[in-house]
Amino acid sequence: MILIDSRVGSNHLVEPLRRRLHCDIELAHLESADVAFEGFGPALAAKDGGNMLRIGIELKVLGDMLGSMRSERFAGSQLVRMSEDYDISILIIQGHWQPGESGQLLTLTRNGWKVMDLSKGSSVSNCFQYAELFKHVLSLSLINGLIVLRSSTELETVWQIADTYTWFQKPWEDHQSTDAIKLQSEVTFGKISLLRKMAAEIPSIGWVRSAAVEKAFLSVSHMTNASEQTWMTIEGIGPTLARKIWIALHEEK
């Protein structure tokens, strides 16, 4: 189920999302975020210690994003509440923008690219530098752990919400498209151990869970000769999974 904030500004998403997703979509009063739903995560990742995560998505058009930057409304209030309400917080900023020759923030209008100005007729200019927005978003991502997505149109925003929802409906260990062993693309600060490489290839473990397996065993031999009870001492591995792992390591081919 997807919950859409019932206040003005979010409820227009209900019908477009219903056309793209086969799930219940309801209007509700959300204390934070415009869209909320549950999805799979790694074991013990959720605030309650389970593997079902609460995901909150906040939507902002470019002008609203810039206004909240100057007033510190988003970082100082909304983001704090989202971090309390959700395990994963996502911000989608909708609009067209780019830097000008002198570093001004330009936005696309019907008459072409224009300097972004929120003064609205006031004699006091309220223009922005491209770096101001870029660095603010970078800080939100790196310091506050917020996932920030950039959308060009309302249609793209709807697709991003729908695709985010379907991504989280897939069990965490089944996401293997960026597996570091298969793609050789993970950034590491040291050589990947043989033990972890082998652990990641064991069915139902995968790359993420292989980190806990690497910490639990002294060597490849220690791992392959471990009992089911030993496997069960590893975070995220219960009796059923331990049995599957033991069979995978000891069955004859």
Image: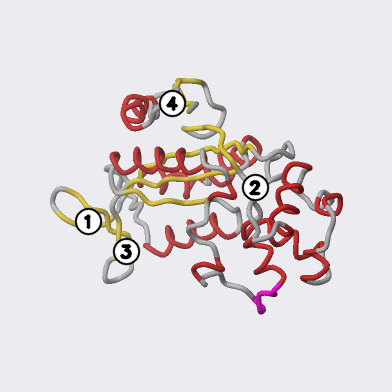
Residue at the (42%, 58%) spot, across then down: 133
Residue 104 shows which numbered tag?
3
Mark 4 → mark 2, Cα distance in angstroms: 23 Å
CB atoms of marks 1 and 3 within 8 Å: no
Residue 203, magenta (yes or no): no
Note whether 87 is above or below 112 in the view shown.
above
Taking the image as shown, residue 216 lies to the left or right of residue 81, namely right
Residue at the (28%, 58%) spot, across then down: 106
Note whether 250 is above or below 82 in the view shown.
below
- Residue lying furthest front: 252
Mark 4: few, some, or many residues within 10 Å (few <14, many ≥20)? few
In percent of width and height, residue 92 lies at: 42, 45
In percent of width and height, residue 56 lies at: 53, 37
Which dot, 4 or 1, sits closer to the camera? 4
Of the pair 76 and 13, the residue shown nearer to us: 13
Residue matched to label 1 = 114
Residue 190, magenta (yes or no): yes
Note whether 149 is above or below 249 in the view shown.
above
Mark 4 → mark 1, Cα distance in angstroms: 41 Å
Residue matched to label 2 = 42
Residue 23 shows which numbered tag?
4
